[in-house]
Image (tube, rainbow, N blue to C red):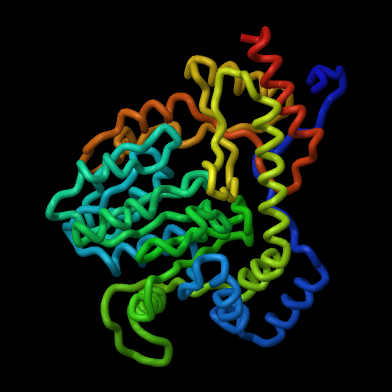
C-alpha cells in the first residue's frame, strides 16, 4: 500500500453507488415499449422479474412489492395477529421495528451476536405464549442463523419473517437466502446490489401464503373484483422499475463477485489493525450490501470518520442508535447489551461495484495512517 497523502485533491470515494444497466440501450428500448404500451404498473415486466428472481431465492414464489418496508408489513400482517408479539433484533434499521407496529403487533427486542445478527439463544429467552413472529435480519448481506431460528419458530407455533433487504444473492449452509423463512423480504432500492431505484419483493413458503400476500398487495382483494378479504395496501410495482431490475439481474453474479473481491482486498489490507470487518463465515456467501467496520475502541470512531472525510472517503454511522434507545421506541426489551455496544463502535466504509482497486487501497491507507499516528 502507498501513503494516502499525495498533495493533490482526490475525487471523493463514494460509499454506495448503484450500477447502471449492463446494456443501457436495451433498457431504453424497454422503457419506450412500456410507455408506448400504456401499461405502466403490474404488467409483463413485473411478472417476468418475479419468475427470474425465483432461482436466486430457493425457487419459492416471489411477489413484487413497492418497497421492502411494505413487504415486511404485508408479511407480518398476514402471518401475525394484532396484539401478539414479534421478536426483532436489538441492532437493525428502524424499519424492522416500525413494521411490527404497523402490523399492530408488539415488538420484543432480543439481542444480537458479535456480528450483529439475531442470537438464537436470546430469541429462545424472549419467547412467550404471545410470540407469533420472529424477525431475523441478514445484516449487510451476512446470513443470519435462519435454520436455527426456523426450528425455534416451529417449536413455538410462530412464523419466521426474515428481513432480507440486504441479502439477495447471499447463501447460508448451501441454501440461497430466501428459502428458510415462511416469508423473506428483499429490497432492490438504489443502495442495494440489485439497485433499481425503489422496490422489493417477498418470497412465500407455499402457494397459499403467496395468494394471501398478493391479496394484501392489491388492497386486500384481487384485481377485477370489487370485494376485499381483509387489510391491504396498493403495493403494485412500476413496470419501469421491474425492467431496470431485470437488466441489472443480467450481470448480478458478476456484481456479487466484484463485491466479494473488494471485501477480500479490505480484509487483507486491514489485517492487524484494531478492528473487525463484516463478512461471511465459512460455508456462507454474503452479498456485501455494506462493508462494516467494528472498531475495538469506540472512542476511535469520531476521529477516524473525520480523518476519512478529510481524505475524501465517504462513511456512514451504521444503526448508531440501538432499537430500544430510539426516541419513539415502543415495545418490550428482553436483551440488548451487544446491540447497544455495536451501535457505538460500527461504521460503514465504501462498498459498491464501481469501486476501483486504487480507491479501495486509498481507504485502507487512510485507515493505516490513522492508527499509525493520527489518533
Instruction: Please tell me in which quadrant of the rendered image residue 159 appears.
Output: bottom left
Answer with left or right where residue 195 lies relative to residue 278.
Answer: right
Picture coordinates of residue 229 (x, y %)?
Answer: 27, 82
Question: Which residue is drawn at the image coordinates 87% and 22% (left, top)?
Answer: 8
Picture coordinates of residue 234 (x, y %)?
Answer: 42, 73
Instruction: Please tell me in which quadrant of the rendered image residue 110 appears.
Output: top left
Instruction: Please tell me in which quadrant of the rendered image residue 76 appears.
Output: bottom left
Question: Which residue is drawn at the image coordinates 34% and 36% (left, top)?
Answer: 326
Picture coordinates of residue 55 (x, y %)?
Answer: 56, 70
The answer to whether residue 219 is seen in the rendering is no
- Residue furthest to the left in view is 129
Picture coordinates of residue 290 (x, y %)?
Answer: 58, 42
- How many numbered marks does the figure carry? 0
Question: In the rendered image of this protein, does residue 316 appear above or below residue 86?
Answer: above
> In the rendered image, which quarter contains the N terminus?
top right
> In the rendered image, which quarter contains the C terminus?
top right
Give the camera-side residue of 248 and 25: 248
Question: Which residue is drawn at the image coordinates 35% and 59% (left, top)?
Answer: 161
Amino acid at each position: 500500500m502507498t501513503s494516502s497523502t499525495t498533495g493533490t485533491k482526490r475525487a471523493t470515494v463514494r460509499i454506495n453507488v448503484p450500477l447502471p444497466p449492463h446494456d443501457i440501450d436495451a433498457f431504453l428500448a424497454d422503457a419506450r415499449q412500456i410507455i408506448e404500451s400504456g401499461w405502466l404498473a403490474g404488467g409483463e415486466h413485473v411478472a417476468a422479474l418475479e419468475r427470474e428472481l425465483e432461482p436466486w431465492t430457493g425457487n419459492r414464489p416471489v411477489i413484487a412489492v413497492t418497497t421492502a418496508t411494505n413487504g415486511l408489513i404485508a408479511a407480518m400482517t398476514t402471518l401475525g395477529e394484532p396484539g401478539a408479539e414479534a421478536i426483532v433484533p436489538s441492532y437493525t434499521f428502524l424499519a424492522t421495528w416500525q413494521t411490527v407496529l404497523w402490523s399492530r403487533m408488539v415488538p420484543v427486542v432480543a439481542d444480537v451476536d458479535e456480528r450483529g445478527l439475531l442470537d438464537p439463544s436470546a430469541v429462545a429467552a424472549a419467547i412467550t405464549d404471545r410470540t407469533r413472529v420472529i424477525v431475523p435480519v441478514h445484516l449487510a448481506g451476512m446470513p443470519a442463523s435462519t435454520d436455527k431460528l426456523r426450528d425455534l419458530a416451529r417449536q413455538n407455533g410462530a412464523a419466521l419473517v426474515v428481513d432480507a433487504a440486504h441479502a439477495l444473492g447471499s447463501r447460508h449452509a448451501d441454501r440461497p437466502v430466501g428459502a428458510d423463512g415462511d416469508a423473506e423480504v428483499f429490497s432492490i432500492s438504489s443502495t442495494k446490489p440489485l439497485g433499481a431505484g425503489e422496490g422489493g419483493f417477498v418470497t412465500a413458503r407455499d402457494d397459499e401464503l403467496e395468494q394471501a400476500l398478493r391479496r394484501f398487495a392489491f388492497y386486500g382483494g384481487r384485481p377485477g373484483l370489487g370485494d376485499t378479504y381483509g387489510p391491504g395496501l396498493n403495493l403494485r410495482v412500476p413496470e419501469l422499475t421491474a425492467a431496470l431490475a431485470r437488466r441489472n439481474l443480467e450481470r448480478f453474479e458478476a456484481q456479487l463477485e466484484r463485491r466479494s473481491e473488494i471485501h477480500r482486498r479490505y480484509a487483507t489490507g486491514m489485517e492487524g489493525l484494531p478492528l473487525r470487518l463484516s463478512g461471511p463465515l465459512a460455508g456462507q456467501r454474503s452479498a456485501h450490501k455494506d462493508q462494516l467496520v467494528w472498531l475495538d475502541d469506540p472512542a476511535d470512531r469520531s476521529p477516524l470518520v473525520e480523518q476519512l472525510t478529510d481524505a475524501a472517503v465517504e462513511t456512514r454511522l451504521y444503526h448508531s442508535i440501538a432499537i430500544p434507545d430510539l426516541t419513539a421506541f415502543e415495545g418490550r426489551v428482553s436483551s440488548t447489551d451487544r446491540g447497544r455496544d455495536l451501535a457505538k463502535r460500527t461504521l460503514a466504509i465504501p462498498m459498491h461495484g464501481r469501486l476501483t482497486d486504487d480507491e479501495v487501497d486509498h481507504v485502507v491507507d487512510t485507515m493505516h495512517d490513522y492508527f499509525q499516528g493520527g489518533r
